[in-house]
Amino acid sequence: MVDVNTIVGDPVETPDGSVIMPISRVTFGFAAGGSEFEGSKDQKDGYFPFGGGSGAGVTLQPVAFLVVGGGNIRLLPVDANPIADRIMDSAPQLIQQIASLIKQPSPSNKNGHLS
């Protein structure tokens, strides 16, 4: 009923060379039930009439888009706080920039030692 292309959709290439893949959540539900009726006038050969039913449901919900391009891989969620996601995506770059500022010697101290 489900293959990998249902969960991770077919990749789409954009004009700038990035590749976008949709990511989805699939949920299945099944139910079945039945009963026998006692004391019915239709009773034949010691068997009671039977009533039953069954059902199934499937949902497919888009969750995110995986974007690969420009040397980066980003996961863009569909139902999330975009500001928080942007902060989390840019956190590694921000940490690298802060670390590089700390490691640079000051202009007045060219040997890199604190005075």
Image: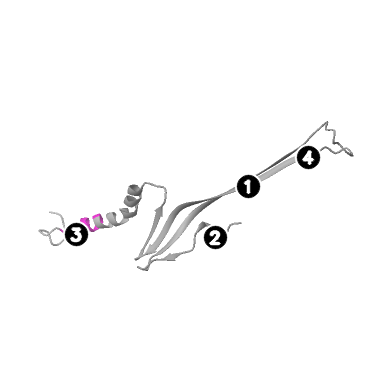
Q: Which residues are magenta?
A: 98-105
Mark 1–mark 3 Cα distance, whole angstroms, equals: 63 Å
> Please, what secondary structure does the residue beneath circle 3 have?
loop
Task: Give the label on residue 56, or none.
Answer: 1
Task: Give the label on residue 4, or none.
Answer: 2
Q: Is residue 41 placed above or below 3 in the rendered structure?
A: above
Earlier in the chain: of badge 1 and badge 2, it is: 2
Mark 1 vs mark 3, foreground winner is 1
Mark 2–mark 3 Cα distance, whole angstroms, equals: 48 Å
Q: Where's residue 65, x and y in %?
A: 42, 57
Q: Amino acid at mark 4?
A: Phe
Q: Can you tell which quarter of the image residue 93 is in?
A: bottom left
Earlier in the chain: of badge 2 and badge 4, it is: 2
Task: Give the label on residue 104, or none.
Answer: 3
- Kindly identify which residue carries mark 4: 50
Q: Where's residue 50, x and y in %?
A: 78, 39
